[in-house]
Image: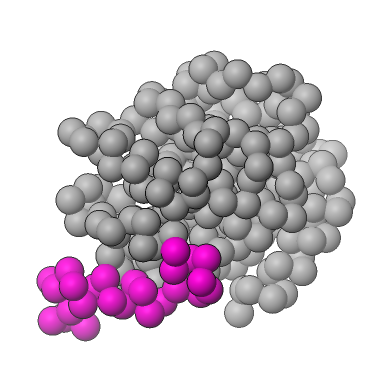
Amino acid sequence: MKGLESDPQKLRIMAQDACIDDQQERILRAMPHMIWHVGNPGHQGDHLWDREYGNAISCTMREAHILSLLADMIDPEAVIEIGTHMGWSAAHLGIACWGPVWMIDPWGLLGQLERCRGNVKRATEHSDLHFVQGKSPRALDDIGLAEDTNVLAFIDGDHTKEAPMKDATGILERWPNAHLVLHDVEVLPVAKAIREITEKYPLRMGIKLDTANGIWVNSLDREVIAATISIRERWVP
C-alpha cells in the first residue's frame, strides 16, 4: 500500500477496480481527477479524493451507491445536498433524480467550483443543476422550491459544533416533509444532531446504516424507512 499511495495512476486504477457497477464506473470516468483513498483511521474503505483539492475525501463507493438507491426509491421532486465538495455523491443522487439538484458548498479554493461543476455535469448529463456557493443553512434561502416539494436532502457539510443540527433544522423549517440523509454519523456533532432531531421531531422515523462512515435516514414516510431497511440488508455487511 505504501508505494501505491503516491502513485496517482495506480490509485486511479484502484478506484476503477472498486466500482460497484457500470453506472458507478461511468460516473468515475466523468471525474478524471478523482483517485482512490483509503479513508480516515477507523473509517477505512474505498473512498475517492481529488489530489489537487484534497481538503476532504468523498463517501465510499458503497455509500455513494446506497445514495443512488435511496434517491431511486424515494423518487424525490428535488435533491438538496449540503457539502458537495467535488461532486461524487451529488452525481450519484443526480443520476437517480428527474428533478432539480441543488448543491451547496463554499468551494473556497481557486478553480474548485469549476472542477465540481464539470464533474457533475459530465457524470449526470442532468439539465437542472444548481450550484450555490456559500454556507448553509443561510444558503438554503437561495433555493427556489415550494414548501410542499418532495425533497431528499443529503447533509454532509460542516461537521463541527452545532452545524449539522442547524443544517437539518434549516431543511425541515423550509420543507417539513423532506427526507433527511446524514453522513458521518459517528462524528460527535452529527451524532448529537441525530439525537436532537429524534427528540424535536418525534413523528419522524430514523434508521442507521453501519457503512464505513455511517448513514442515517430520517423520514415521515414509513415506506421509505421499510425500503431503507431492505437496502441495509442488501448492501451493508
Q: Position of residue 46 (x, y in %)?
A: 39, 71
Q: In which quarter of the image is the N terminus?
A: bottom left
Q: In this view, does 48 lie to the left or right of 195?
A: left
Residue 86 or residue 123, whichever sits in front: 123
Q: Is residue 184 above or below residue 209?
A: above
Residue at the (18%, 73%) spot, across then down: 9
Q: In this view, does 44 lie to the left or right of 163?
A: left
Q: Where is residue 94 in the image (x, y as percent from the top left)?
A: 55, 46
Residue at the (24%, 73%) spot, across then down: 11
Q: Is residue 25 left or right of residue 178?
A: left
Q: Position of residue 57 (x, y in %)?
A: 33, 55
Q: Quadrant of the C terminus?
A: bottom right
Residue 172 in view:
yes
Q: Position of residue 197 (x, y in %)?
A: 68, 38
Q: Is residue 134 above or below residue 159?
A: above
The magenta span reads 1-26
Residue 105 or residue 216, whichever sits in front: 105
Query: Is residue 3 shown in magenta?
Result: yes
Residue 233 or residue 200, whichever sits in front: 233
Q: In this view, does 237 lie above or below 81?
A: below
Query: Is residue 182 shown in magenta?
Result: no
Residue at the (74%, 49%) spot, across then down: 74
Name the image quarter holding residue 225: bottom right
Provide the major secondary structure of the magenta segment: helix
Residue 217 or residue 76, whichever sits in front: 76
